[in-house]
Amino acid sequence: MEEHDSDWPLIGICSRPSDTNADESVFSTAYADAVQDAGGIPIALPFGFEVASIASKIISRIDGLLLTGGGDITPDGFGGNIYAKHCVAKIAFMSAERDVFEWAAVRAAWDRDIPCLGICRGLQVMNVSFGGTLVRDAMERGATIMHWQQDRRFEPVHDVWLSRDSHLARIMGTDILHVNSIHHQAISTPASEARIVGRASDGVPEAIEFPNKHFFMGVQWHPEMLGTMPQIFEAFVNACRSEAKARATS
Ligand code: MN
């Protein structure tokens, strides 16, 4: 079958502030490469208070939203009350400008049922956008294994057990994954419409799905760095392509 440009869905990739200049919008090219390898066109999305006001217009022009990793969520972001009450751990690298854009973008994607993949912070953003909470540090929910990997971040350091009946287990064709781990925060309570479908051996949530949407999934690890899980990006991009075609014909 002949391939058309329209077979390549447009995937918006959220950016983060650069470490040296909070006004610079940057992201790791590993995300763009993973999207392209899966047959999607990667485009960078900026953040900021001003662009947040047109987030729904942006979402209406793209076929998928990739929520990326990065710094911690501001305590009063995403409507506030996102950290469990007992949490006191130090948080860092926050950006209110980033939070406000991503909050608007993920809710617009939800309303239009645009496929959404959340990676690391992205999983946390999905959870708190729809009423879930976080712990400031995984230790505050009983983590006993190392979830903060200092170096060789492309190598797996712990396992994740998936629910056998999850979308993710079907995509991967297995119920155990070997993952990297570059997070100090974790889900405390899941969003009411979210289902925790993967956990580390210490019980820390590592994957969520929103079964009421066509494709709304978050993973706590970084598959774009591992390079061993192209199936996740392929499933995401395929969902973006079919949703785009369904919208075009409706
Ligand atoms: Mn982990």
Image: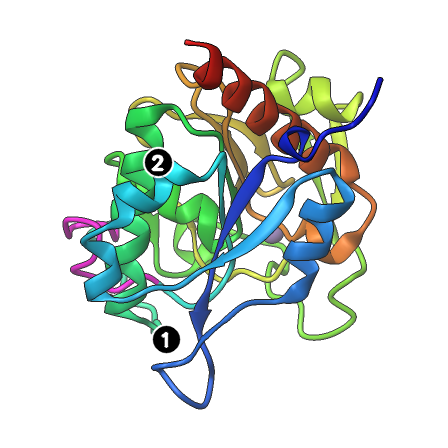
Query: In the shown orientation, is residue 243 left or right of residue 149?
Result: left
Q: Mark 1 packing: few (<14 Cα in 10 Å), some, or many (20+)?
A: few
Residue behind label 1 places its C-beta within 8 angstroms of ligand 1: no
Give the distance between the C-alpha atoms of the residues marked 1 and 2, in whole angstroms: 32 Å
**Is residue 75 magenta-colored?**
yes
Q: Where is residue 108 in the image (x, y as percent from the top left)?
A: 29, 36
Query: In the shown orientation, is residue 178 left or right of residue 68?
Result: right
Image quarter of residue 56: top left
Q: Where is residue 4 in the image (x, y as percent from the top left)?
A: 72, 29
Work out whether 36 lies above or below 169: below
The reply to whether residue 180 is in sight is no
Front-most of 180 and 237?
A: 237
| Count of numbered circles in the view | 2
State which region is magenta. Answer: 73-83
Which callout, 1 or 2, points at the residue further toward the start of the chain? 2
Q: What residue type is labelled 2?
A: Ser
| Residue at (35, 53) in percent of width and height | 135
The residue beneath circle 2 is 60
Work out whether 22 lies above or below 95: below
Q: Where is residue 18 in the image (x, y as percent from the top left)?
A: 46, 80
Query: In the shown orientation, is residue 100 left or right of residue 40?
Result: left
**Is residue 166 magenta-colored?**
no
The residue beneath circle 1 is 92
